[in-house]
């Protein structure tokens, strides 16, 4: 007896070709859309945060606190406590420093960014009582910060430059 297993795969992304599917948070088979239109629609209805999707690596940080304005606005909109929001801002700032290090190629700068990410992660885990929530929040900040191809490519270079290094986790980070 011969068994056949068939996989069907589909992908979405980079193409500006009209497609049918998700419009304003729902499936609508009659309306074509591009990826950009789908993102705009999901941002408009609140399903996704409104993010800077330009190729500018560091985005806009008008108050120069190390957190892109779009991420700061998103964090401020969350129902989380002020301590939790502070930990999320710290995480966004740490990932942003990894982007700067990845762009520069400076190993010392990358090492400092790793330390910042580790401390920020420890602070998120301290701020949220449930480990799974803390993990998800840390991952979300990473994804929202590294939200374009240009940022992803630089973040990948940063991670590759740190491959194989030994990292010590902070024993008792100052999260204030």
Image (tube, rainbow, N blue to C red):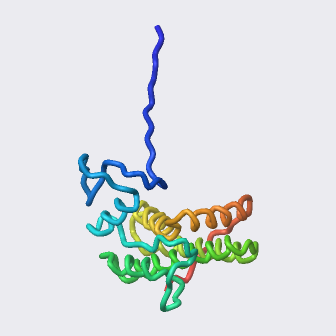
Whether residue 150 is visible here, answered yes or no, is yes
Whether residue 125 is visible here, answered yes or no, is no
State the residue at coordinates (33%, 75%): 78
Picture mark count: 0
- Compared with 9, 113 (above or below) is below
State the residue at coordinates (71%, 75%): 104
Q: Position of residue 90 (x, y in %)?
A: 51, 79
Q: Position of residue 21 (x, y in %)?
A: 31, 49
Quadrant assignment, res 36: bottom left
State the residue at coordinates (62%, 63%): 153
Q: Relative to the observer, which residue lies in front, 162 or 128?
A: 162
- Compared with 173, 12 (above or below) is above
Q: Residue furthest top?
A: 1
State the residue at coordinates (54%, 75%): 120
Q: Position of residue 174 (x, y in %)?
A: 55, 83
Would you say 154 lies left or right of 132 here?
right
Q: Position of residue 73 (x, y in %)?
A: 38, 81
Q: Relative to the observer, which residue lies in front, 44 or 167?
A: 44
Q: Residue furthest front?
A: 17
- Compared with 56, 153 (above or below) is above
Would you say 114 lies left or right of 39 here?
right
């Amino acid at each position: 007896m011969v068994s056949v297993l068939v996989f069907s795969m589909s992908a979405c992304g980079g193409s500006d070709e009209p497609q049918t599917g998700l419009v304003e948070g729902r499936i609508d088979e009659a309306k074509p859309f591009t990826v950009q239109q789908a993102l705009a629609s999901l941002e408009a209805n609140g399903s996704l945060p409104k993010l800077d999707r330009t190729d500018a690596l560091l985005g806009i940080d008008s108050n120069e606190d190390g957190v892109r304005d779009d991420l700061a606005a998103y964090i401020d909109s969350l129902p989380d406590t002020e301590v939790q929001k502070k930990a999320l801002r710290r995480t966004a700032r740490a990932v942003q420093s990894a982007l700067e290090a990845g762009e520069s190629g400076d190993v010392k700068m990358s090492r400092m960014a790793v330390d910042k990410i580790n401390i920020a992660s420890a602070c998120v885990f301290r701020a949220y009582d449930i480990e799974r929530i803390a993990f998800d929040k840390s991952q979300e900040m990473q994804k929202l910060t590294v939200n374009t191809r240009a940022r992803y490519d630089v973040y990948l270079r940063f991670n590759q430059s740190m491959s194989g290094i030994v990292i010590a986790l902070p024993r008792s980070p100052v999260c204030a």
